[in-house]
């Protein structure tokens, strides 16, 4: 009887693989230390850089330029900006300084812009006076929105502006906005004919729907309503010689009805109507 050798089951054979060596803790520690040092150095560099940027005199405001000012002197503008020079270019609040400028009577608006490294540029938009408002026995320059700019005096003698009556409001503000708007519309309408505009001496807007106008060297009050101001004044100038021949001493002329002109003689409280010729 022959002996048969049974092959051994390979599933139970141990694998001939050498176990992996454990990594030592020292290389990991060294890497961690290096990373920590790099982070600290980076933070210090950033801190130093930021600290330098925010403390260096190279970025402090040392020059202020001013443009757009005509009525306001450069000194007046800079007095409103006292303290801006020496501020840091990156942290200075330009909107705050802009609002301080806008508080000046002549300033309608202002823009401030950084010009690196050390300059702030200021551009002023000044108010345009439309007339000389008679406000409680004082003559004041007013703009088309009814904003009081300054008291009229010798320093504004070169301004050729009409006197505006009837602006005083009974409310909390000194100037009535609706009346100021009517005066503005009268002046804007006449500016289309400069020669006609130069003839206007006074404007009365006591009635917010009916402007009255006085011309230079003419005592007649001209009622021009709330529209067609230049057209109605022009028609009066054409009719004036005829009206003076027919009416001795004119108190007022009502031009609001276009096709008809009503004339009241001085001293007549009933009024006299006259057809347009």
Image (spheres, helix red, strand yellow):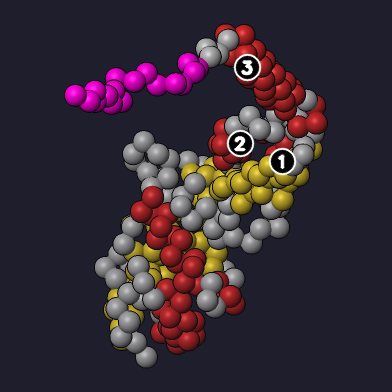
Camera sees residue 73: no
* Magenta stretch contains residue 19: yes
Query: Residue 211, position in %: x, y?
Result: 39, 64
- Taking the spot 19% from the left edge, 24% from the top edge, the residue there is 1
Q: Which residue is mark 1?
A: 120
Q: CA distance from mark 2 to mark 1?
A: 9 Å
Mark 3 and mark 1 lie on one chain; the one further toward the N terminus is 3
200, above or below 150, in the image: below
- Taking the spot 57% from the left edge, 32% from the top edge, the residue there is 96
Query: Residue 66, position in %: x, y?
Result: 73, 46
- Taking the spot 29% from the left edge, 78% from the top edge, the residue there is 257
Query: Residue 46, position in %: x, y?
Result: 67, 24
- Taking the spot 34% from the left edge, 39% from the top edge, the residue there is 171
Mark 2 and mark 3 lie on one chain; the one further toward the N terminus is 3
Q: CA distance from mark 2 to mark 3?
A: 48 Å
Between circles 3 and 1, the one closer to the viewer is 3
* Magenta stretch contains residue 4: yes
Query: Residue 52, position in %: x, y?
Result: 75, 24
Mark 2 and mark 1 lie on one chain; the one further toward the N terminus is 2
Q: Which residue is mark 2?
A: 94
Local secondary structure at mark 2: helix
**What secondary structure predominates along the stretch shown in magenta?**
loop
Along the horizontal axis of the image, is 183 left or right of 42? left
Q: Which residue is mark 3?
A: 31
In terms of depth relative to the viewer, which is nearer, 38 or 91? 38
Local secondary structure at mark 1: strand
In terms of depth relative to the viewer, which is nearer, 206 or 247? 206
Quarter of the figure with residue 99: top right
- Segment colored magenta: 1-20
């Amino acid at each position: 009887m022959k002996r048969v050798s049974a092959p051994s089951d390979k599933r139970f054979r141990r694998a001939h693989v050498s176990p992996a060596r454990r990594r030592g803790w020292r290389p990991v520690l060294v890497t961690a230390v290096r990373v920590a040092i790099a982070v600290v150095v980076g933070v210090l560099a950033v801190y130093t850089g930021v600290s330098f940027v925010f403390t260096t005199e190279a970025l402090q405001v040392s020059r202020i330029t001013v443009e757009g000012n005509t009525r306001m002197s450069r000194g007046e503008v800079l007095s409103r900006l006292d303290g801006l020079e020496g501020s840091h270019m990156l942290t200075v609040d330009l909107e705050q300084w802009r609002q301080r400028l806008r508080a000046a009577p002549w300033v309608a608006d202002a823009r401030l812009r950084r010009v690196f490294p050390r300059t702030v540029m200021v551009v002023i938009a000044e108010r345009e006076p439309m007339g000389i408002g008679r406000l409680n026995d004082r003559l004041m320059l007013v703009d088309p929105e009814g904003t009081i700019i300054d008291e009229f005096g010798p320093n504004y003698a070169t301004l050729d502006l009409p006197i505006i009556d009837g602006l005083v409001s009974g409310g909390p503000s000194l100037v009535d906005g609706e009346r100021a708007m009517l005066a503005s519309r009268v002046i804007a309408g006449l500016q289309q004919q400069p020669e006609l505009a130069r003839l206007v001496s006074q404007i009365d807007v006591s009635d917010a729907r009916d402007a009255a106008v006085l011309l230079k060297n003419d005592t007649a009050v001209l009622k021009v309503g709330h529209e067609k101001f230049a057209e109605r004044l022009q028609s009066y100038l054409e009719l004036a010689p005829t009206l003076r021949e027919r009416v001795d001493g004119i108190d007022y002329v009502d031009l609001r009805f276009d096709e008809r002109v009503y004339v009241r003689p001085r001293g007549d409280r009933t009024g006299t109507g006259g057809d347009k010729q």
